[in-house]
């Protein structure tokens, strides 16, 4: 049976690469905003940072991270990176910034890994475009570079990576390792991929994803054994050895844990997939359709394996977006292989949607900023005052200038895209990636004080500190890890978060309740002789209160 012809048709003109300076500026505009001048935000970001800080300050063992004296199930390798960065940069850098630096580097590695994986896969014979009858087709190397540029832009344009990719959490380390693993498997030939496989699969296990490491490794082993390429087949002993190392690496790094959860309803899952994977998922589906006769080829099977494993892990863990994020490098590669098969009208539709959507989004951000500063328009100003009571906006000139510069660059990019380089293979990904970078820049400059006020636990810690003597021990039995981390970092208190902390020596007790009615824990504390002295809440939280209790006797 004659194999179906490859669907890609690419001219030499379309295979021009994105100028390196422009690509570097794209990456910088994506990576740097949010790195400086903000607190760790409550949730996973603050929790992970709190454990890194406890390790760095000697309040927690390097081998058994704790928060408030309570052991956690944190994977060791990512927390070691953050803690080491804090230790090495003290006292010159703020601990929150110091911990964030290695994770920004890991995100950069994820971007680079996606570029190089696409570059190697696009150079394979099965991925090459069809030759023209009279010449003029793209050269293999130029085609591979253009495809790699497109995949990198597609990854940066994906909405799901935007916030999660800029946090200080173990999932960023996992993302970098997955992208690196896809890279070394795509390269295949030489000694470096063999060493990379031996290092990366155990590293993924040590970063908190041992099951995913084993499944990815097993899938890669299957691809290796069935490949027609001799160099790819030669990887199988190294993959088998890496699987054994990954299984062993999970034990000393405390990575093996039961994380299965009930799968949520179909509608919430569908909503998550539609926005989290946008705009890569329509292109990936188009790739699967147009290349449907070639799905067993490595340039489709490998990224399909990466995304498929992450997708299955997300479902098994209750539809979590953090597991789904690990499939984005594979999805970006699949999306890139749709571009050589797109019609001009489809690419134009993507451009117009991107121009309208991101220009409107940037306009909304600017209008809200003006409302914060001037009170005009009055309705947005009233909404901000209602949602963030007590927030006082101040003009910061450097962020304002950066936001203005980013907006001007966006307008220039729109004009450039619609006026020149219409034949470039990556053309339809420039505006989505640029629009995402613009909106992230505006949020992390114009809106950063408001977002910090709303999402940081610093305001709550400052309010609670008014009722607690400096350095006093605080009992917070079974409190959220975000609250414990905030009290230790922002409040610089000694915290006991054990379930029996209320019976311990701490003279101050804090309990969290929803609403005004006393919870059973609060009633039990009153019966045990604790006296309520205050109740505070975050400025942007209407329902959750933190109650402060004192017991008789001197404060230690």
Image (cartoon, helix red, strand yellow):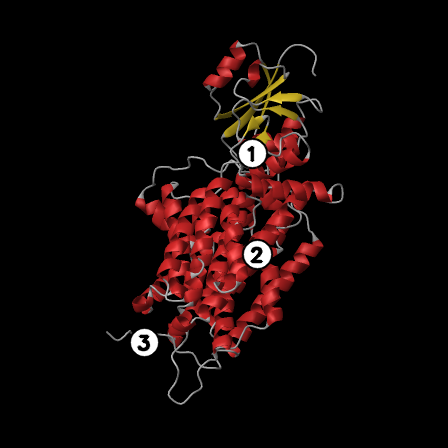
Query: Spatial distance from mark 1 to mark 3, Cα to Cα?
Result: 55 Å
Q: Which residue is drawn at 54% across and 51% down?
A: 199
Which of 423 and 331 lies nearest the eye of the viewer?
A: 331
Compared to residue 43, the image places residue 242 above or below, namely below
Residue 132 found in image quarter: bottom left
What is the number of the mark on residue 109?
2
Residue 176 appears left or right of 321: right
Q: Position of residue 142 (x, y in %)?
A: 51, 76
Residues at discs 1 and 3 in contact (Cβ within 8 Å): no
The answer to whether residue 147 of the structure is visible from this angle is yes
Which of 209 and 383 lies nearest the eye of the viewer?
A: 209
The residue carrying mark 3 is 5
Q: Where is residue 16 in the image (x, y as percent from the top left)?
A: 52, 77
Mark 2 crowd level (few <14, some 14–19, many ≥20, 10 Å Cα): some
Given this view, does label 1 or label 2 mark the residue nearer the observer?
2
Residue 416 appears left or right of 9: right
Compared to residue 389, the image places residue 381 above or below, namely below
Which of 381 and 534 lies nearest the eye of the viewer?
A: 534
Q: Position of residue 474 (x, y in %)?
A: 62, 22
Q: Which residue is drawn at 64% across and 62% down?
A: 404
Quadrant location of the C terminus?
top right
Q: Position of residue 308 (x, y in %)?
A: 37, 53
Sequence-wise first label, 2 or 3: 3
Mark 1 crowd level (few <14, some 14–19, many ≥20, 10 Å Cα): many
Mark 3 crowd level (few <14, some 14–19, many ≥20, 10 Å Cα): few
Sequence-wise first label, 1 or 3: 3
Given this view, does label 1 or label 3 mark the residue nearer the observer?
3
Mark 1 residue element:
helix
């Amino acid at each position: 049976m004659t194999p179906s012809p490859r669907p890609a048709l690419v001219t030499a003109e379309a295979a021009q690469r994105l100028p390196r300076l422009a690509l570097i500026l794209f990456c910088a505009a994506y990576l740097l905003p949010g790195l400086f001048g903000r607190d760790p935000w409550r949730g996973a970001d603050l929790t992970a940072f709190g454990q890194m800080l406890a390790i760095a300050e000697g309040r927690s063992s390097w081998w058994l991270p704790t928060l408030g004296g309570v052991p956690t199930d944190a994977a060791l390798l990512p927390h070691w990176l953050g803690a080491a960065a804090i230790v090495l940069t003290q006292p010159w850098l703020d601990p929150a910034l110091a911990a964030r630096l290695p994770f920004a580097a890991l995100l950069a590695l994820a971007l680079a890994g996606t570029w190089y994986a696409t570059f190697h896969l696009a150079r394979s014979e099965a991925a090459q475009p069809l030759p023209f009858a009279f010449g003029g087709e793209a050269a293999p190397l130029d085609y591979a570079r253009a495809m790699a540029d497109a995949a990198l832009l597609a990854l940066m344009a994906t909405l799901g990576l935007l916030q999660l990719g800029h946090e200080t959490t173990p999932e960023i380390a996992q993302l970098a390792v997955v992208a690196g693993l896809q890279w070394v498997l795509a390269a295949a030939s030489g000694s470096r991929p063999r060493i990379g496989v031996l290092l990366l699969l155990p590293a993924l296990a040590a970063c908190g994803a041992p099951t995913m490491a084993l499944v990815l490794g097993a899938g890669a082993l299957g691809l290796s054994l069935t490949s027609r390429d001799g160099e790819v087949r030669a990887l199988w002993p190294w993959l088998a050895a890496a699987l054994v190392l990954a299984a062993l690496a999970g034990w000393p790094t405390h990575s093996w844990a039961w994380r299965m959860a009930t799968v949520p309803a179909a509608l919430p899952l569908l909503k998550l997939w539609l926005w989290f994977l946008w705009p890569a998922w329509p292109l990936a589906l188009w790739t699967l359709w147009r290349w449907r006769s070639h799905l067993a080829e490595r340039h489709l099977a490998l990224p399909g394996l990466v995304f498929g494993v992450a997708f299955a892990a997300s479902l098994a863990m209750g539809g979590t977006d953090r597991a789904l994020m690990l499939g984005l490098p594979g999805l970006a590669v699949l999306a890139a292989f749709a571009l050589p098969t797109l019609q001009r009208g489809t690419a134009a539709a993507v451009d117009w949607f991107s121009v309208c959507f991101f220009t409107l989004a940037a306009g909304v951000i600017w209008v809200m900023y003006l409302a914060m500063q001037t009170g005009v328009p009055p309705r947005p100003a009233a909404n901000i005052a209602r949602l963030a009571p007590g927030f006082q906006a101040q003009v910061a000139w450097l962020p304002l200038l950066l936001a203005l510069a980013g907006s001007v660059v966006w307008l220039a990019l729109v004009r450039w895209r619609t006026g020149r380089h219409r034949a470039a293979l990556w053309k339809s990904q420039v505006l989505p990636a640029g629009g995402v970078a613009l909106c992230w820049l505006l949020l992390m400059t114009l809106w950063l004080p408001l977002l910090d006020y709303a999402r940081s636990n610093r305001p709550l810690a400052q309010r609670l500190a008014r009722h607690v003597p400096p350095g006093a021990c605080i009992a917070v039995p079974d409190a959220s890890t975000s609250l414990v981390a905030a009290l230790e970092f922002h409040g610089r208190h000694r915290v006991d978060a054990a379930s029996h902390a209320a019976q311990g020596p701490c003279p101050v007790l804090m309990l969290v309740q929803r609403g005004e009615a006393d919870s059973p824990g609060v009633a039990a504390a009153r019966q045990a002789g604790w006296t309520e002295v205050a109740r505070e809440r975050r400025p942007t939280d209407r329902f959750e209160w933190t109650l402060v209790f004192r017991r008789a006797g001197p404060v230690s």
